[in-house]
Amino acid sequence: MRLDFNGKQLAELPDCLVRCEWLPKPLPGETPPKGRILFACSAAGGGVPFQEHLDAIQDACQRAGLDFNPDRDVLRSLTREKLAEALADTEHPVTVLHLLCHGVLTRDKAYGLVLSPEDPYEEPDRLDPSDLRRLLPGRVTSLRLVTICACQSGDAGIPSQILGSVARVFHRVGVPAVIASRLPLSCKGSVTLVKHLYSELLLGSGNLRKAISSARLRLMREPGAKDWAALQFYGGEEDEAALRPFDPPEPSTGPAPRPDLVLVCHQALSQVRKTPGHVDAPRLLENRHVEEVSVDQTQALGKNRRSNLSEQVRRLTRPGGELLSAFSKPGVELLYYGFPLVPFAVLAGYLARATQHVHVIEYDREKERFTWDESPGSAYPPLEMEKPVLGPGRAMQLRLSISSEVKPADCETVLPAHDVRADLHFKVAKPAFGIVRREEQAQAYKQVLRSKLNQYITEIDGINSIHVFAAVPVSIAFLLGQVLSATVFPRCYVYNFNAKAVPKPGYEWRLSLDDAVHNKKPFVHIFKTPHIPGDAP
């Protein structure tokens, strides 16, 4: 990622640390363990710089006065059994696990680790993310840092790998900080990393932000290598203790102050009469300052809806406008809700981007207010995808049936079947209004959409655009926009359905998300004469 103001890449900035985070937070109240480094190594996949790593760790520990005994704290010829036993040893808890081995693409097309086999005459053991997850305890409580010196240990492989990379597996089971390599890692680069990482942690600031930055800057000076760009870090955004594995800060005696919450109310179809209150979302709204931002487009999109569409889209994407100003506020949490048009809600999520966590809340028609069902154990219908239907075209047709059924015949009036390469239909068992009743449900649907879209955009060749036909509530439309904002996707179009259209309901217009963001007109296309299936377009 190159910065406009100085021409440098983001990773070149001193003390810059990009974090990947598995959103569930660590359990509170865990006692920080005493410092112990466990060095685990396997050369089953070929030669590794074992002695150089050992010397670097031993030298840093000796100078810092940290007890490190090679007879006790080094696992040579690492096997699955040795790794599982070491991490389950409560008498000698491990603070930092340093893994040195080769990375490999497993049979399931996931990147894993090459470990030593139990029988020395057998082939090397290929440990994939699923196997690793089964080896680890249900929740790791002693580990504070895992450093994985293995090629592509931060790469999940094909997008369908639900667990992600081996690095993310460690983070998901509770390890606050994980360092891995997103790309192949050279032997020389791994030695530079271990020297400067542990030197800064044990003899310098003790902070991972500084340690990773220091190691990366040293790696940048090595000619020809790209190891500096390969480093990947997993750590919670608000977990400062994750940055100090050997010297975590003292736990606070009182509850940490919660950041301000900005309520972004988006109105277009109709106006919102009552904003969410403490009784509607107590977990989100209690004990914090709340600020309200209103984006009201109801009057502008009243009787002259079609003629004002472009102007109102530009209002949403304008730098310094209400929406982008709210999304760019530093140090706050966001809650998006209201009654926007579906393409406008998708555009709002697209502007918020996939990297920003934004809360959503739905309107309860029975209670006549915005609220979530907070009762424990409430079940919800899963969002499932039918088997993709392939065709001769180049467009991916994405149908979402949650509030009502999205019928292929309606889509074909504006997107001919011969233009479609793949028809992906996501639906709940019985589409109806009011299906989405919990924020966890909305986020779960988002993960399904993200996983499947990533999978099929990779597996199906020749797709040059995504066309969205969504009968969904506002929360899902917004979260879908965040999914579509990922850079892996081609040009995206969102279609607006008018149930009151004359002479019959149908799709009236579509919005190009990419053109709208870049103000490349015309970003709104209004369908004057619907395409009749069977006719020439």
Image: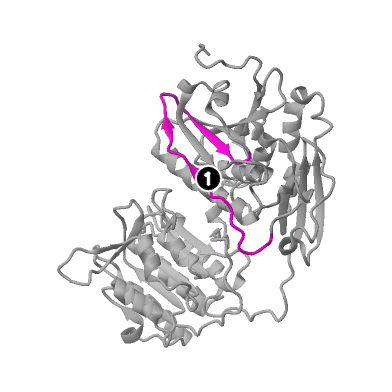
Q: Confirm whether residue 218 shows in the render.
A: no
Provide the residue designation for mark 1: 449
Does the magenta run of residues contain 388?
Answer: yes
Query: How far across and how far down the image is residue 144, in percent?
Result: 50, 75
- Asked whether 290 or 368 is in front, the reply is 368
User: Which residues are the magenta region?
Assistant: 374-403
Query: How far across and how far down the image is residue 70, in percent?
Result: 33, 84
6 vs 418, left or right, is right
Query: How far across and how far down the image is residue 372, in percent?
Result: 70, 55
Q: Residue at x 40, y 77 (%)?
A: 87
Q: Residue at x 49, y 70 (%)?
A: 175
Q: Residue at x 59, y 53 (%)?
A: 380
Quick one: which residue is furthest to the left in this view? 121
Q: Quadrant of residue 511?
A: top right
Does the magenta run of residues contain 22?
Answer: no
83 vs 66, left or right, is left
In the depicted structure, whether residue 385 falls above or below residue 137: above
In the depicted structure, whether residue 352 falls above or below residue 57: above
Q: Tell me how the rendering is colored.
A: one colour
Query: How far across and how far down the image is residue 157, in percent?
Result: 39, 51
- The amino acid sitting under disc 1 is Leu
Name the main secondary structure of what is drawn in magenta: loop
